[in-house]
Image (cartoon, grey):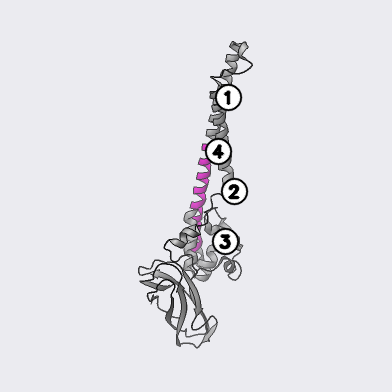
């Protein structure tokens, strides 16, 4: 499930990291935003129908991949996850059941042995010998613990206890961390109309809100559109707390339409940074 969820997150980032609400409404996925979000968490196995809707709106509709090829590839990923989940559930269920039966059998054996001794010595029937009572109690406790472990195994997925706990904010505040905040579109805000075939410069302003200086960082383009833009642009060094203006030179398409280009911050090797942050983007109308 974790591997499938990781692939879904990678696909979402490649497609510009749209929100789950956008995927469900504007992009037309036949699944609720909560179902799409659950599929990407990796805590439960999504249905194939939800998985395919997640993939279809991103891989086929947005990234223009071949629908049949995408379906075959992702069906194989989903079936591997489903098979692994089924094997895991079977193994865990069998182990818990066997442990429970062994504990109960041990308790029963202790009880039978006591009954035999009581039959041989009727004068002791009123209460078990003190030497035997700890053994009986231990056997019963073992069986009860095994049964409790089995029940916990069955019901734990419903309790939410396996969800990650919230980070310690006080520890985070004192330890080095990387963070950013988008401040504004300096030029060409969303919906700006530009003429066909013209060149223009898009500028964003973002701020380093972490405690780590930014050096050797870039904005790297995530998708292709009829408008042309460099694959990546360098970000000037930025100290914690400082803002920076990032400029990208763009050439409008030769025919009217909409151009929406996404960028993410990366290092020099192309590794994405600040993965929890949404991409910044250019969104203009060519006319």
Helix, strand or loop status at disc 2: helix
Q: Which residues are magenta?
A: 69-96
Up the image or down, 67 lies above or below 196; here it is above
Q: Which residue is mark 3?
A: 36
Helix, strand or loop status at disc 3: helix
* 2 or 1: mark nearer the eye: 2
Q: Is residue 224 visible?
A: no
Q: Position of residue 272 (x, y in %)?
A: 42, 66
| Mark earlier in primary sequence (4, 3) | 3
| Mark earlier in primary sequence (2, 1) | 1
Q: Residue at x 51, y 48 (%)?
A: 85
Q: Which residue is mark 1?
A: 108
| Mark earlier in primary sequence (2, 3) | 3
| Mark earlier in primary sequence (1, 4) | 1
Kindly report the distance in space between the C-alpha atoms of the residues bearing marks 4 and 3. Answer: 32 Å
| Mark earlier in primary sequence (1, 3) | 3
Helix, strand or loop status at disc 4: helix
Q: Which residue is mark 4?
A: 149
Kindly report the distance in space between the C-alpha atoms of the residues bearing marks 2 and 1. Answer: 32 Å
| Residue 89 lies within the magenta run | yes
Up the image or down, 145 lies above or below 64; here it is above
* 1 or 3: mark nearer the eye: 1
Nearer the observer, 226 or 13: 13
Q: Looking at the magenta stretch, what is its main secondary structure?
A: helix
Q: Is residue 143 visible?
A: yes
Kindly report the distance in space between the C-alpha atoms of the residues bearing marks 1 and 3. Answer: 50 Å
């Amino acid at each position: 499930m974790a591997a499938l969820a990781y692939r879904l997150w990678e696909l979402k980032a490649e497609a510009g990291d749209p929100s789950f609400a956008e995927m469900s409404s504007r992009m037309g996925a036949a699944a609720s935003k909560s179902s799409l979000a659950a599929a990407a968490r990796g805590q439960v196995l999504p249905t194939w129908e939800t998985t395919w809707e997640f993939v279809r709106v991103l891989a086929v509709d947005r990234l223009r991949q071949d629908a049949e090829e995408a379906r075959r590839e992702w069906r194989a990923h989903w079936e591997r996850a489903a098979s692994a989940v089924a094997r895991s559930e079977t193994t865990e269920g069998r182990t818990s059941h066997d442990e429970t039966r062994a504990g109960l059998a041990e308790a029963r054996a202790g009880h039978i042995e006591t009954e035999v001794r009581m039959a041989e010595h009727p004068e002791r029937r009123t209460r078990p010998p003190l030497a035997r009572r700890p053994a009986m109690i231990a056997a019963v406790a073992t069986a009860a613990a095994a049964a409790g472990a089995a029940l916990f195994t069955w019901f734990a997925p419903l309790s939410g206890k396996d969800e990650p706990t919230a980070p310690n904010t006080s520890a985070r505040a004192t330890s080095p961390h990387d963070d950013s905040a988008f401040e504004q579109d300096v030029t060409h805000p969303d919906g700006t109309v530009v003429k066909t075939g013209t060149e223009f410069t898009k500028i964003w302003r973002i701020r380093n809100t972490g405690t780590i200086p930014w050096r050797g960082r870039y904005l790297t383009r995530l998708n292709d559109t009829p408008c042309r833009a460099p694959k990546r642009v360098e970000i000037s060094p930025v100290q914690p707390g400082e803002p920076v203006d990032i400029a990208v030179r763009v050439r409008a398409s030769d025919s009217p339409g909409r151009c929406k280009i996404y960028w993410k911050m990366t290092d020099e090797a192309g590794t994405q940074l600040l993965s929890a942050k949404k991409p910044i983007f250019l969104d203009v109308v060519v006319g």
